[in-house]
Image (tube, helix red, strand yellow):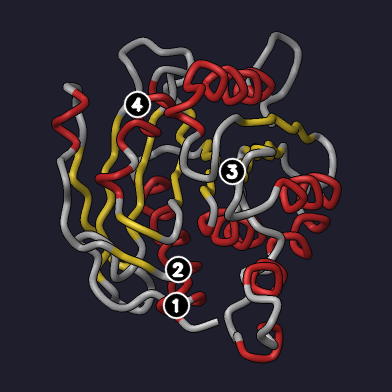
């Protein structure tokens, strides 16, 4: 599959973080190869019991972080910090996207959070972002991993979308999510909708089956990009349930 089929970045912001009407930080930092990156950090509500927990959001293949503010707002309602990352070539991040680059970008965002003193990080991957965070989880220590509407791999998905093409031979881009999951020993949440017409429900089922315990599956509603529009309370409920499993309790160590 060609890069333009997989990466569809938008460099223009529709809005800024101001739209949420709460404190936020416009963050600029660099990947290890020197690529300049941009993200938006939203601190947790004051006195939140989850103020030490941060969700690092790696978004899907289109748009940029300005298109993920409803997602950020929903996450903030659970009491966590939220960091939205734009990969290279998206929004105000420089460069051109590629598989290795997106992996490095997520790692750079993780390091930024660590320098800020935020050690408990849940990596959240939406669609393409699931392929990014599953690799991140192999490289760094995470408190948890969330795969939302994520494929098993690009070749798997491509061969389904374009059955008349030898996709497995044509593409060098892998994002082999499913094969990485058995190596991960962290709490995991898989979210997917049966109504997803872009990445079929079976991909979520296979990813869940490949993951080790502790793990949780949450069924979403709506098509690929409709989960929040169709059932935002249900989406939040699933995320909240997963985060609750990460909360420290008396006599139990944090995961």
Give the alpha-carbon distance from disc 1 to disc 4, as whole Å.
28 Å
Rendering coords of residue 54 (x, y %) = 45, 34
Single out the residue that lies furthest toward the bottom.
Answer: 169
Give the alpha-carbon distance from disc 2 to disc 3, as whole Å.
17 Å
Where residue 92 sits, quadrant-wise, is bottom left
Give the alpha-carbon distance from disc 1 to disc 3, as whole Å.
21 Å
Q: Residue at x 51, y 22 (%)?
A: 231
Nearer the observer, 94 or 2: 2
Asked whether the beta carbons under mark 1 and mark 2 sit within 8 Å of each other, the answer is yes
Rendering coords of residue 195 (x, y %) = 63, 39
Location of the N terminus (image quadrant)? bottom right
Circle 4 — which element? helix
For disc 3, the marked residue is: 148
Mark 2 and mark 3 lie on one chain; the one further toward the N terminus is: 2
Between label 1 and label 3, give the one nearer the viewer.
3
Mark 2 and mark 4 lie on one chain; the one further toward the N terminus is: 4
Mark 1 and mark 4 lie on one chain; the one further toward the N terminus is: 4
Which mark, residue 73? Answer: 4
For disc 1, the marked residue is: 98
Asked whether the beta carbons under mark 2 and mark 3 sit within 8 Å of each other, the answer is no
Circle 3 — which element? strand
Which mark, residue 102? Answer: 2
Give the alpha-carbon distance from disc 1 to disc 2, as whole Å.
6 Å
Q: Residue at x 54, y 61 (%)?
A: 132
In the shown orientation, is residue 232 left or right of residue 254?
left
Which mark, residue 224? Answer: none
Nearer the observer, 97 or 159: 159
Nearer the observer, 214 or 1: 1
In the shown orientation, is residue 204 left or right of residue 18?
right
Circle 1 — which element? loop
In the shown orientation, is residue 38 left or right of residue 14?
right
Q: Is residue 236 above or below residue 68?
A: above
């Amino acid at each position: 599959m060609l890069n333009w089929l997989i990466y569809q970045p938008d460099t223009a912001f529709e809005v800024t973080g101001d739209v949420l009407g709460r404190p936020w930080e416009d963050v600029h930092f660099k990947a290890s190869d020197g690529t300049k990156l941009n993200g938006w950090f939203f601190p947790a509500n004051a006195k939140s019991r989850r103020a030490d927990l941060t969700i690092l959001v790696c978004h899907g293949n289109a748009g940029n972080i300005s298109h993920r503010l409803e997602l950020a707002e929903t996450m903030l309602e659970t009491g966590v910090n939220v960091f939205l990352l734009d990969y290279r070539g998206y929004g105000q991040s420089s460069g051109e996207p590629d598989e290795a680059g997106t992996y490095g970008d997520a790692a750079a965002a993780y390091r930024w959070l660590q320098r800020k003193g935020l050690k408990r990080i849940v990596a959240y991957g939406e669609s393409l972002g699931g392929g990014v965070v599953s690799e991140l989880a192999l490289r760094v220590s995470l408190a948890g991993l969330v795969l939302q509407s994520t494929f098993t791999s690009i070749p798997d998905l491509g061969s389904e979308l374009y059955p008349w093409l030898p996709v497995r031979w044509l593409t060098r881009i892998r994002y082999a999510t499913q094969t990485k999951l058995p190596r991960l020993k962290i709490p995991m949440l898989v979210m997917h909708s049966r109504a997803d017409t872009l990445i079929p429900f079976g991909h979520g089922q296979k990813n869940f089956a490949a993951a080790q315990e502790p793990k949780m599956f949450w069924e979403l509603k709506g098509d690929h990009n409709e989960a929040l529009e169709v059932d935002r309370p249900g989406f939040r409920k699933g995320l909240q349930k997963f985060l609750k499993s990460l909360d420290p309790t008396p006599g139990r160590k944090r995961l």
